Amino acid sequence: MPKDVITPRATDYNQWYLDIVREADLAEPAEVVRGCIVVKATGWGIWEMMQRELDQRIKATGHANVQFPLLIPKSFIMKEAEHVEGFAPEVAEVTRAGGEDLTEPYVIRPTSETIIGHFYSRWIRSYRDLPLLYNQWCNVMRWEMRTRPFLRTSEFWWQEGHTAHATEAEAEAETLKILHEVYADFVEQVMAVPVIRGLKSEKEKFPGALRSYCIEAMMQDGRALQAGTSHNLGQNFARAFDITYTDQNNTVQHCWTTSWGVSTRLVGALIMTHSDDEGLVLPPRLAPTQVVIVPIYKNPEERARVLEAIERITGDWQGRLRFKVDDRDNLTPGFKFNEWELKGVPVRLEVGPKDVEKNSVAVARRDLPGRQGKSFVPQAGLTERLVALLDEMQTGLFQRALAFREQRSATVRTYDELKQQVEHGFAWAYWDGSADDERRIQEETRATIRCIPLDQPEAPGACVYTGRETTRQVVFARAY
C-alpha cells in the first residue's frame, strides 16, 4: 500500500481529504444514488463510537430514544412558513407508490420537527405531561447539489432531539444544556476538537427557530465547521401544530419546543482536525481499535512463540483497552504497519522473537509518525503504560488543535483587516450590522458570521463594518 496515494495537504487540501476518506476505507461514493455515500466498516465503526458516547450523554440528561416515520405528509412541511422556505430547495418527494399516484405526496424527512409536532399535539394534554424529552437516531435526506463525503451528502445519519416545555425559560435551559453538557463536552473531551460555543445570527439561524446555538470548530485549512446545533423553537411549531397544554390554572397554553442535532458530519470534522499526510489520526477515546498488535515471525515456530507472548501480554486488557491482534499470514508486517497507520489506530505494538527474548515490545504512536513516535519498552507494566500513553495522546491532540486555532485567529478592527484574516482563519470582530450587511460581506469575502460567542467582552468597541459602538463580538470565517 504505497504512501503516495494521499495528496499532501499543502498541495491540495480538498483532494487530501478525499484521499483519506478513500484510503482509510471510510466511505465511497454511491454512484447509483445521486449525492449519497456508502459508509464502510471503518467509517461506520467510528460513527458507532460517536453514537455510543453521545447516546450516554443524551440519556444522562433525562431523554429517551424513540423513532418516527421516514415519510412526512407534504402538508405538514407547509404548516410553518419560515421552515418550509428554508428547506424547500432540499426536499425530496414521493409522489407514487404501489403503482398509483398518491393523493398527497410524502416528503422524505429533511428533519422531523413537523411530524413530531403532529404527534406531540396528541400526546400532550396537561402540564403534568411536560417536559417531553425525546431523541431519535435516524437518516435524513436533503437534496444537495454539491456534495463531499460526510461533510455534505444528500443522505446522512444523525440524532435529532425534540422536546416540549411549559415555559420559555425551561426551553432555553434545555437548549443550552444540550449545547454544553452533550455536544461541546463530547466534541472536546472525546473527539479532542476545541469549539467555540455561540448564538447564530438571525440570518444564519435554523428556519423557524426563535434562537439557534452552535459549536464551531476550525479545520486545518483555517475554515470553520459547524459541529452541532441546538435550537430554541419558541412557540412557532407549537402554534403551527397546536401543541398545547392545560396549566395549573386550567388555562390552555402553547408549549415551548426545542430541537437539536449532530450528524455524520462529525466524521468529516474528525478527519480535518487531526489527520496528516500519512492518513487518518484518531483520538484514543474515539478509536474503535486503540491498540493494534502486529506479530513478526519467519517460520511456524517463531509464530507460535510470538503469539503465545502476545496472549500473555494482552491477558488483562479486556475492559481496559480496545485492541486487535493482526495475525494475518498473507500480508507482510510493513503492509500491516501502513494499513493501520492509514486507518489512524492510535498505538501499534510490534512483537517479534527478539522482543520475546528481551521481554520488550516496540511501541509506535500514531500522533508522532516515524522514528520520533517509536520506542522499545518492557513488557512488565505495559498495560498501565499504554493507558497513560493513550491519555497523553488524547490531551496532546486537543492541545495541538487548540494551539492551531489560536494561531490562525485574530481580532480585527477594520473591514480590510477582516477581509485579509478570513483568507486563512477566524476573524473576531465587534459587530452591529444588519442581515443585509452580513449578506454583502458574504458576497464580497465568502465569509459568514459563524456565531456570536456566549463569552462576550465587557468593554465596547467599534463595529467592523458600520463603525457604531457595540459590546457584541462575533466570529467571521469561511466555512464548510
Image: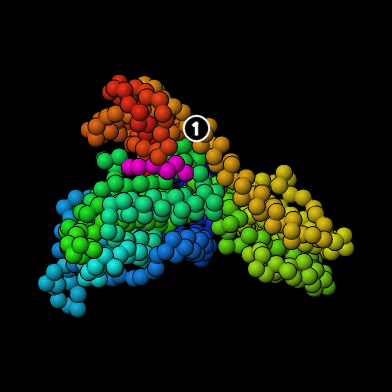
Residue appearing at x 73%, y 45% in the figure: 371
Query: If the image is split into quadrants, where does the C terminus sit?
Result: top left
Residue 116, image quadrant: bottom left
Mark 1, residues whose alpha carbon is within 10 Å: few (<14), some, or many (≥20)?
A: some
Residue appearing at x 32%, y 63% in the figure: 131
Picture coordinates of residue 278, whole percent (x, y): 60, 48
Q: Residue furthest right?
A: 357
Q: Secondary structure at mark 1?
A: loop
Image height of 387 relative to 202, above or below: below
Q: How is the image coloured?
A: rainbow
Image height of 222 relative to 410, above or below: below
Q: Residue furthest bottom?
A: 98
Picture coordinates of residue 404, whole percent (x, y): 54, 37
Q: Which span of residues is magenta-colored?
A: 195-200
- Drawn side of residue 88 relative to residue 65, left or right: left
- Which residue position holds label 1? 408
Picture coordinates of residue 323, whole percent (x, y): 65, 65
- Drawn side of residue 441 relative to residue 150, left or right: left
Residue appearing at x 20%, y 54% in the figure: 236
Residue appearing at x 74%, y 49% in the figure: 374
Q: Nearer the viewer, residue 57 or 9?
A: 57
Query: If the image is split into quadrants, where does the N terminus sit?
Result: bottom right
Q: Nearer the viewer, residue 238 or 112?
A: 238
- Drawn side of residue 48 relative to residue 278, left or right: left
What's the magenta bit mostly, secondary-structure-wise? strand
Picture coordinates of residue 282, whole percent (x, y): 57, 53
Decide whether residue 198 is among the magenta residues.
Answer: yes
Amino acid under disc 1: Arg
